[in-house]
Amino acid sequence: MRRKVDFLVIGSGIAGLSYALKVAEHGKVLIISKTKILETATWYAQGGIAAVMYNPDTYNKHIQDTLVAGSFLNDEKIVTMTITQSTERIEELIRWGAHFDKESSGRYALAREGGHSEYRVLHHRDRTGSEIQRALTEKVFQHPNIEVLENHFTVDIITQHHLGKIVRRTHTDTQCYGAYVLDPETGIIDTILAKTTMIATGGAGNIYQTTTNPTIATGDGIAMVYRAKGIVDNMEFVQFHPTSLYNHKEKPSFLITEALRGAGAILKDQKGNEFMHKYDSRGSLAPRDIVARAIDNEMKLSGSEYVYLDARHIPEREILDHFPNIHAKCLSIGINVMKEMIPVVPAAHYICGGIKTDADGRTSINHLYASGEVASTGLHGANRLASNSLLEALVFSHRASEHAVKQIQEIEFMESIPDWNAEGTVLNEEMILITQSRKELQAIMSNYVGIVRSDLRLLRAAQRLEILYRETEALYDKSVLSVELCELRNMINVAHLIIKFASQRKESIGLHYSIDYPSKD
């Protein structure tokens, strides 16, 4: 089936939905959601969204905190632009119906997280992301110009390559004409022609064995754009959240928000001793990369599989009011956080690199935008400051929408795009070929390309990944497409990029730490 839309949006988190709501006044919008519209990384975001709201906080303080967290590899102009637009975007989100916790005075109750010098994180208890997702989803379903296709998988974006033309990464005239989208229920791959396309597919945490990301986070957007010869950047900077709940039976790992440490929870070793001050004067409120490495080192020194987060001294009322979800989750596995310490372990959480964009969310491919975790905007540098990600998505989706709306009248549909050709493919009846390769990939990345790396580990990872790549491409070429096969292919693409960028960086900085280059930034 062939369809035409003015604005194609791939992804249904805060980046995709906020963009869709803004462009919908100017044309027909189609949102492609890989599963249900609510199943996004946004939904799982606990901590909150950072923005300057009250004195004594200032834009300059937030800018400086962001630069320090990113080891000054950030684009300072982008940081300044994003932070100075933060208050306006938050106010708009509130007008759309998102609710944030308030004090009795009516002021918003702001939290402080690791790396922040002031209280500036707006939150809705410990379920901020789900509240934002709820508000945006309700608005989207009410809009007559927006259609949502749930449980559909985007296979590839369409460029001149599909017209038989050569496309190179150095070309500046590559165009995006839409996307090929798979309906897993029917097996049919539709051709969606679009004047503009927004990639908002989120991250890639599932290339690791342990992640806080939902199972849909398999790097699809980054892989699609890279295959289309788009430019990606900063792929070596993968953030591991220091504190996911240690529960090896559960995937994704349950996140213990950084806000709990902001409220006073302390990291302790197996003997109950505080250890973070050995690594950083900020203790348990140090930036995430420092805390994750410290926990990793403590686990290696002791041989244990986890450390503890001690919240027993936090008042019971504060736990119940601000962290009810964490309290309930821990109780469900037999841990009373008011009387017992919480076992925690680092987990892959956020990729700071991705599809390279400019200040308006434009990628190196014309008429193609990217926003959210899938994008590398220059905001995060070598490490993302806590709670800056939801803000980044709002700012760049807003700016992308303004640019796209101005361009839309000048863009024509490319009518000559061929439909998807599945000739010669057969149904793959051995799912083990996919599931085992996925496990091997996750083991390679976790063991060799995790929190701490080395040149030898990266070399081994590259060599082993090359075998998986050749096997998967051969399977892809001859098989009727499935979501599982496409995801595996995308995950291998993204893993390759992380290894490639990490191998090229001969220093330890931010989230990339190598024992061969131990000097700290």
Image: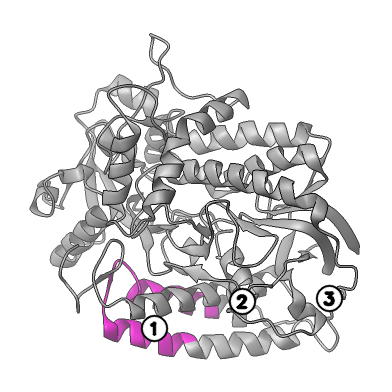
Residue marked by disc 3 = 420
Q: Secondary structure at mark 2?
A: loop
Does residue 135 appear in this view? Answer: yes
Q: Is residue 14 above or below residue 297?
A: above
Q: Is residue 190 above or below residue 361?
A: below
Residue where numbered disc 2 is placed? 229
What's the magenta region? 437-465
Of the residues shown, which amino acid type is indicated by label 1? Ala
Closer to the chain start, of discs 1 and 2, is 2
Which numbered disc, 1 or 2, marks the residue closer to the eye? 2
Q: What secondary structure is marked by label 3? A: loop
Classify the position of the C terminus by image quarter: bottom left
How many other residues sit within 10 Å of disc 3, few (<14), some (14-19) or many (≥20)?
A: some
- Please tell me which residue is depicted at 63% across the width and 73% down the height of the picture: 172
* Residue 335 in view (yes/no): no
Tag 1's secondary structure? Answer: helix
Task: In this rendered view, identify the residue nearer to me: 366 or 392.
Answer: 366
Measured from the top left, where is residue 150 in percent x and y?
75, 51
**How many marks can you see?**
3
Closer-to-camera residue (508/492) = 508
Q: Is residue 148 left or right of residue 292?
A: right
Task: Report the side of 398 relative to 141 (left or right).
Answer: left
| Residue at figure coordinates x 41%, y 50% from the top left | 77
- Residue 95: percent from left, percent from top: 60, 23
Residue annotated with mark 1: 461
Is residue 438 depicted above or below 146 in this figure?
Answer: below
